[in-house]
Image: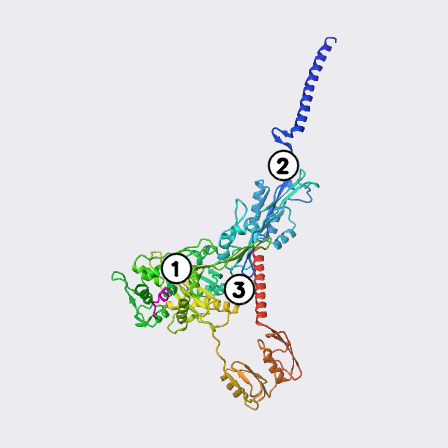
Amino acid sequence: MNKKQPNMNVGAAILFVIFGLLFFVLVVRYFSIQITGEVAGQQLAAKAQQKYSREGILPSTRGIIFDRNGEVVAEDTTSYTLIAILDKKMTTDPKKPKHVVNPEKTAQELSKIIKMDESEIYEILTKGIKKGRFQVEFGKAGKDISHETKNKIEDLKLPGITFIRDSKRFYPNGIFASHVVGYVDRNQETNKEVGKMGVEKSLNKELTGENGKITYESDLWGYILPNGKEKVTPAKNGNDVYLTIDKKIQTFLEDAMEKVAKDYKPKKIIGIVADAKTGEILAMGQRPSFHPKTREGITKGWHNEAIETSFEPGSTMKIFTLAAAVEEKVFNPDEYYESGSYRVTEKDKAIHDHNGSGWGSITYLEGVQRSSNVAFAKIANEKLGFDKLREYLTKFGFDKPTGIDLPNEATGKIQYHYPIEKITTAYGQGTAITPIQQIQAATAIANNGKMMKPQIVKKIVNHDTGETIKEMEPEVVSTPISADTAEKVRDYLETVVTSPKGTGTRYQIEGYSVAGKTGTANIPGPDGKYLRGANNYIFSFLGMAPKENPRLIVYVAVQQPQLEGADTGIGAIPVSAVFNPVMQNSLHYLNIKPSTVDKANVYELPNLVGKQVEKTVKSLKDKDIEVVVLGKGEKVIGQQPEPGTAILEGEKVVIQTNGELTAPDMSGWSLRDVMKVANLTGMKLHSKGKGYVVQQNVKPESQIRKGDYLIVELKTPEEQWQEELNSNDEQESEEENTKEKVQD
């Protein structure tokens, strides 16, 4: 026993020393950390902050695109992505499962709401479960879910089915200047929306916002600590863009193009409406087009044809050859020349007028009206000279892009090496230019010599503050001709429309003088030769109105419409079906007064009482006086206005017969005309509002008696116009909602 005691003491001493050293190391280490705050060269405070700090993203909103009047064209709206949680670990309470427990039932119920077959949904769920995935999505059918659809799915109370909130680009007008506005797509790498076409692409930087962030202190599970510090960097939303497009005028264009596309099935239609004074584009569209939300139809036309495609313009080019000749004072409208054919040199083939044989010896003005190629070939070669014509092609901007704020603008391709190319360029063949270049050049004719840069963007506004960041001002590109020349050219071009010999007679608009030029452009085939056949052309018209002081320029081109007949002149039918309603409706919408107002004839109204009704009606109608007959008798027993009253052609005269009285349909009547009925019949008149009748209490053709009340509601044309706009907007909104429901 005594021998063991010393050994135990030695062991205890060794253990004491070891534990003492460990304690010393711990104490040193403790004070070292306390003093330096570092471990292995890393700050403990930073490590703690990293572990217990959280950062959240504050998403920004892409800027809104408006039309010139503040109508929304494109904006961000909330959408949802459907997901299914498959991981069983997400369920902590079996009574309240948080993952998909019954794939078969889930697939069956979801297939009733989203556009996906039950079998497809079931396959996605079961494959995900087999591969041990945490969650799965449902492709295109599960993206861009509307709030209404989300609620329907949530009402099913399917375990594991949930949503990720997102935003999507919404285009409330559907197919509406689609190639101008463009669309956005999500970049898979950055998960950011990027403009892919039109203004969405060209102004992507301005429209794109910057996400903000929030940094906060949390516990181990991510919950915010009560006294934790927060740091918020607010999101910066994208800027709003106001286009020069006018929603109403764009709608006129879209409707007209859609009708022509259905009726004539052309390969392409291009339409542009521009403000003649500023160069602002009020409408631009094409067919085929596409829906910017669904992308439906986009494979039929990726390019903005008005901007990105150059082609032979045809005879609309003659406008600018004519302007050059007038400016150089070498155009004599009364000078005669021999039409039919013309050979620029002995080696070159002769060029011909479009009818082959010409019209004999005619004046140059008639040559303009008939769109004679020979007339313009002679003007280019013998009057102007090729070098001078080439100068004007540059002055009119045909050899460089216009610089409009739209992507991928093409430039003109002027073929001007050989004499034959020079004369064909003068009348629009061989050389290719873009429609937007023609619009720019036409502003010089319409705007008294000042050529205006085409503009599609009106201003850029800060989304958050409403402050205007940039506002576009009208820009004069050049002044290729004088005001006097511009006026003369418009006068000559008006005769193209008004003269029986003119090629533009289909483009007459009642009440307005139109100056313009038709175009029939050849289309090169795959072998480089021009296509043959009456339909194988690009038919176009470039016109402006009112001629005296143009406010609008409209260009329409229709490629290869399906027409019956061998005459290329029938190509004006589909073109005018777009140009005429668009120009006329736009002029009315902008309250532009008609060019000419015919003076109405004035008549003194005779005493009609006692005369035969049938003869009286005929005699008044022969003088273009509108007759309203009250009653079904054969003799007139009363009249309004009174005998001897001076009345205008087109004014209403109300006559009362000896038969039973019935109420007329007074829709659109003035209050003055309604009073004529009340005075004759002895009815008590009560009116509401101003303008013209929109509603009456007595139904048309119903019996009326003396002493009855006649109550009418009147509204001004402006009020009726606004109601129509609101009604159309509501209808479009309902149609869009219906489409979304069908798509959902």
Which residue, given by chain and number where applicable, does mark 3 sit on? 248
Name the residue nearer the viewer: 532 or 172.
172
Locate residue 130 relative to residue 276 in the image: left or right. right
Label 1 belongs to which residue? 395
The disc labelled 3 sits on which kind of residue? Lys
> Disc 2 marks which amino acid?
Gln
Disc 1/disc 3 C-alpha distance (Å): 33 Å
Horizontal arrangement in the rendering, residue 601 relative to residue 531 (left or right): right
Question: Residue 126, percent across and down?
Answer: 58, 44
Read off the magenta span.
Answer: 324-332
Q: Residue furthest left?
A: 346
Residue farthest to the right? 1
Residue 115 visible at all: no
- Eyeballing the image, is 447 above or below 208? below
Residue labelled with disc 2: 50
- Amino acid under label 1? Lys
The verdict on residue 742 being magenta is no
Image-based side of 649 in relation to 534, left or right: right
Residue 550 x %, y %:
46, 67
Q: Is residue 390 visible?
A: yes
Disc 3 is placed on an element classified as helix
